[in-house]
Amino acid sequence: MSTAFSFQTQLVSIMDALSKTAVMEISKLVEIESKMLKIEITRGRNEIASLTEKLQLMEKLLFMAQERRQGTAAAACSEMRESSENKALLASDNSKLFLFGLCYIMLVIGSIYIFHLLSTGKDVVMDTQKAPNVMQHPKPSAEHQQPLFTNSFMGSSSQLPRADSRRLEMQWNPQLTPAHATLQEGKQVVQNVASQNISASRNSSAKRFGCMQCGKGFRCFSQLEIHQRSHTGEKPFRCTLCGKRYAQKGHLYTHQRTHTGEKPYRCTICGKGFIQKCTLDMHQRTHTGEKPFVCVSCGKGFTKKCNLKKHLTLHLDPSLN
């Protein structure tokens, strides 16, 4: 009777300890996730502010281009003694171009921002903790991205005198109108800006997490965390049967098959089972005769890389023959 009571007491204490440990782990994970979400929200706000500044800059540039085109159109009309109806038509075409450019730019910037959020959303869910030696590649700020718009716009504005000469020739060509030429120039400016925006967004979203020790970049934080264990020597995954530790969970699962006897990879020719797929691939070369590792000195082939290394030592030190 006393033995049953002591066993029950031990069981209750074990369950209590396990429940406390589970609560601590869950609270720790919730805290880490909340921190990562706050970081993502802050980063999203910064991106929105940067996109707003770029949009305001484009509005100013388009407005300046509109004023310049209106001035050159008025001068050309006064020289060629155009009628008041042509002046009103040119002004309406310019206003349509201005509105079209603004709508197109807002649509492109919005689609780029949505694409960026979708590409980074998976990384936020997978990241469970943030190490102190994490280095994120800095994102291009609004000051660095403004020349992107300025260069593309200056390239198009340098062609304005050519457009003015074409506008003078249109007076003698009834098949061309000022509205058609103005719309074509505006579309080309907007398309150049949009293409540069997309390329800049793709470059900024690739491999954002960098290692502080070797500088290698990764797309998500979980990959960086696994890589950093090669520098720190950390092996958090421990085998409960023999106590051996591993840096990755997949390596622990592979090791545990040596205890359980599980061999999920089976040869289709002879039926022999293997713990790892790489071991199965090397075994199948005995059936197929494939020798992918070839010596560059004598051309001899080997099924295993270790055999090729042993063979290369014979070329380096002929006395071993």
Image: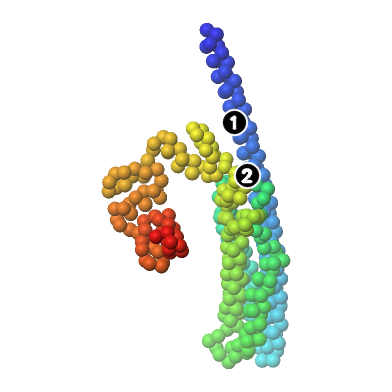
The image quadrant that residue 44 belongs to is: bottom right
Residue situated in front as seen by the camera: 42 or 51: 42
Q: Are marks 2 and 1 in contact (CB under 8 Å)?
A: no
Residue closest to the eye, 178 or 85: 178
Pick the residue in front: 101 or 38: 38
Q: Residues within 10 Å of mark 2 (few under 14, many from 20)?
A: some
Residue 35 occupies which quadrant of the picture? Answer: top right
On screen, residue 104 above or below 4: below
Label 2 and label 1: CA atoms lie apart by 17 Å
Q: Considering the numbered disc 2 on the image, is that residue within a helix, a strand or a loop? A: loop
The residue labelled by disc 2 is 129
- Whether residue 46 appears in this view of the structure is yes
- Please report the residue visible at 29 percent of the width from the left and 56 percent of the height from the top: 288
Element class at badge 1: helix
Quadrant occupied by the C terminus = bottom left
Q: Residue at x 63, y 87 (%)?
A: 162
> Farthest residue in the top direction?
1
- Amino acid type, residue under disc 2 in the picture: Gln
Q: Position of residue 40 (x, y in %)?
A: 65, 50
As drawn, the residue found furthest toward the left would be: 269
Which corner quadrant of the image does residue 94 belong to?
bottom right
Q: Does residue 179 appear anywhere in the picture?
A: no
Residue 78 horizontal side relative to residue 105, left or right: right
Near mark 1 (Cα within 10 A), the count class, few <14, some 14-19 or many ≥20, is few
Which residue position holds label 1? 22
Identify the mark nearer the N-term, 2 or 1.
1
Q: Residue at x 43, y 61 (%)?
A: 319
Q: Position of residue 124 (x, y in %)?
A: 59, 48
Q: Is residue 13 placed above or below 201 in the rendered structure?
A: above
As drawn, the label of residue 305 is none
| Image position, residue 36 (x, y; %) | 64, 46
